[in-house]
Image (cartoon, rainbow, N blue to C red):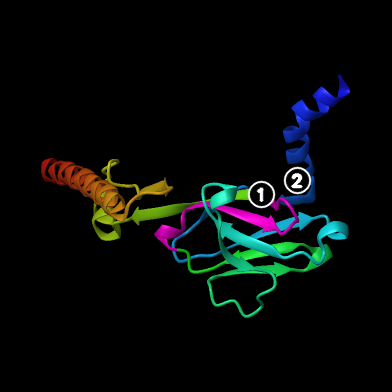
Amino acid sequence: SNAEIYVNHFPCLAFLSASLQLQCDKREITAHIGGEFILKCNYDTNSFRYSKKYWCRGNSRSTCESLAHSENVQNTHKSQVIDLVRRGLFVKVTNLQFGDAGMYWVGIDKIYSDIMTPAHLRYKMFATLCLTSPLSVCSSLSCPLCSFPVSASFSVSVFPSSLLLLLFSTMLLSVFWFLSVTLRKCHRQFQFD
């Protein structure tokens, strides 16, 4: 019957309706430690112009802890929710730290069930090493193994700080080992020429 079809598909209709009422430009946010990001969202201004908008953190809608909202202009947290109505809803987060990675939600207060959309925050770390003086000496000796910059990059999601330190230390040791082997080859080539 039509009633069964409506009941069976109601969760899909509710999700579709919510996604049309609140849409953000990103669901995955990649940022740097110490940096910031701005998330731009649009919402149904006819229905929710005067509703409170908020930014919260949690793995699910039901466990989301509010960090900032649009009715608090003097927000002391590093997160701000700025509602410019027709120009959009903006979430600005500054001074990002390792512990900030994870699942967040942009929400609009609504009777019975808030409208929410997820945003997952990840970090991008860069470690770049470029030894100019030994490499320039080697390259002047025409050693092809020495004329390169060494760089490595990796993305970090949610890791304990001790694991991050271990990964970072291992990466740096690998780079230094590779450079020492390469410089020894250049030195040997210089001695034989």
Whether residue 26 is visible to the viewer of this picture, yes or no, is no
SS at mark 1?
strand
Find residue 46 and report its image quarter: bottom right
Whole-percent x and y of residue 130? 32, 56
Residue 112 forms part of the magenta stretch? yes
Q: Seen in the image, is 141 located left or right of residue 117? A: left
Q: Farthest top residue?
A: 1
On-image quarter of the C terminus: top left
Q: Name the residue: 67% across, 56% down.
A: 107
Q: Is residue 74 visible?
A: yes
Quarter holding the N terminus?
A: top right
Q: Position of residue 62 (x, y in %)?
A: 58, 49
Q: Are marks 2 and 1 in contact (CB under 8 Å)?
A: yes
Q: Which of the labelled discs sits on residue 18, or is there none?
A: 2
| Numbered range of the magenta stretch | 97-117
Image coords of residue 22 (percent x, y)? 75, 51
Q: For residue 80, which numbered disc appears in the image?
A: none
Question: What x and y, as percent, mark residue 189?
Answer: 16, 41
Residue type of the residue flagged with mark 1: Thr
Badge 1 density bin: few <14, some 14–19, many ≥20, Cα 10 Å: many
